[in-house]
Amino acid sequence: MKIFTRGLVAIAVFLLLWVNLPVSIPYNFTIGVRTFTGEITRPTFVQTIDGRQLVRDFSLKLGLDLQGGSSLIFQADTSGLAKADVNDALDSARDIIERRVNMFGVSEPSIRTIRSGESYRIAVDLPGVADPVEAISLIGSTAQLTFQEIATPEATIATDEANLATASARMPTFIETGLSGKDVKKASVTFNSETGEPEVLLEFKEEGRKKFAEISKRNVGRQVAILLDDEVLSAPVVQTPILDGNAVISGNFTTDSAKQFAIAINSGALPVPVKLLERRNVGPTLGAVEVRQSLIAGIAGLLMVMLFMVAYYGRLGLIACVALLFYGLITLAIFRAIPIVLTLPGIAGFILSIGMAVDSNILIFERIKEEIRKGRDFRQAIRLGFGRAMDAIKDANVTTLLVAFILFNPLNWDFLPQFGLVRGFALTLAIGVVTSLFTGIIITRKLIQFFYRSS
């Protein structure tokens, strides 16, 4: 059992070190007649979801203040809305744009609404994106998807370039069917089994499935127009009634345009039209010197804490330092795996949580010393010390997590902060506190038991 446990610990330590590799490590060694050369790199996982290829390489993601990116300002056209509905429409547009940008693959965008007099704007900051042409196209699309019947049976719709050039048929009059993007449960990218060209598969909700079945029954042998923002994407001829609630759109897509279309439909339609007003590339708001100095300050503070623990608590302090190293590796691995986008406030939250981790150890060690002074043997003092320190540790960490929850404001309450940098601080602090509970209670206890049993 002990060998099995130690093996699991060794594997865990190896995985933590592997995920947290700062750079690739080359190797070149010979065993017998075979020579092995290459380099050790962080693990990389590639996953395809709805036609989108997601690559997870466990690299640290940096925010706009540390690596720069693009800043976009969109003008919202609220002329068609009642004044009482403007704020709700803008909030909805902001949330939809945030979903689109997240699905597009940009890490930790900052999206906020700006009001200047009677002008309403939406500001979008994209960290690490120097050329956001595709993102601009995706964000600016209102994505109003509709299915419409053709009023005149003899009219046809040409949807490809060759037919558009020679089409002589007049454009038909459309009839609203009541079927729209709101009835779509999910849009995903597929590929035609015969031509290999990308298509978009629409899976309807229950009510949408019924609507689509009725539409297809009425239009056997005729075209049904599929429009996005009042432009015809596709106008397939219905061969037989479609009752399974799925529709395939083949609108001369490229793979990228099909992905963008699926993202736009999945995220929902914008309640107001938006137009790009300003675009600019921004450099890091903090220079390399400031970032380096911040890292040096964090490392110096950590070393001073470790020296204090060793000087004051001796062997127990040394154990706390080892647990603190585990804490750092685990927390950084979580940041890389989620991934968390690190801004300077986020780094501050991480460093603050280091203090919380040491604080737990101090409470435990003081309780152990109290039990020893009462005449308990060391094993009994450890057991009682951990148990009696738990109430204080729990209360301290719960209050900190409560503050982090308020700062992160996951429900977007208007009377609480909604800024990305504040949320970054709150998120890294919360993750650090939860991790410190694990390392301070579980790992520190196991290390004490291991080292004192071995001595």
Image (spheres, grey):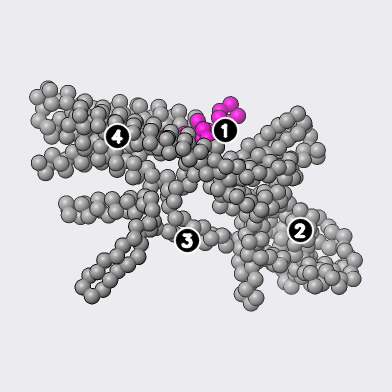
Q: Nearer the viewer, residue 2 or 334?
A: 334
Q: Distance from label 2 to label 4 (Cα)?
A: 62 Å
Q: In the picture provided, is 283 more to the left or to the right than 404?
A: right
Of badges 2 and 4, the one in the foreground is 4
Image quadrant containing the C terminus: top left
The answer to whether the residue labelled 1 contacts the one labelled 4, judged by CB atoms less than 8 Å apart, is: no
The answer to whether the residue labelled 4 contacts the one labelled 3, judged by CB atoms less than 8 Å apart, is: no
Q: Amino acid type of disc 1? A: Gln
Question: Against 257, is 93 above or below?
Answer: above
Q: Amino acid type of disc 3? A: Val
Mark 4 Cα within 10 Å, few/some/many (few <14, many 20+)?
Answer: few
Q: Secondary structure at mark 4?
A: helix
The magenta segment: 407-430
- The numbered mark at residue 303 is 4
Q: In the picture provided, is 86 more to the left or to the right than 192?
A: right
- The residue that disc 1 covers is 418
Question: Against 184, is 118 above or below?
Answer: above
- The residue that disc 2 covers is 227
Q: Secondary structure at mark 1?
A: loop
Q: Amino acid type of disc 4? A: Leu
Question: Is residue 415 rendered magenta in the image?
Answer: yes
Q: Position of residue 278 (x, y in %)?
A: 71, 42
The answer to whether the residue labelled 2 contacts the one labelled 1, judged by CB atoms less than 8 Å apart, is: no
Q: Amino acid type of disc 2? A: Leu
- Asked if residue 94 can be seen in this view, the reply is no
Q: Secondary structure at mark 2?
A: strand
- The numbered mark at residue 46 is 3
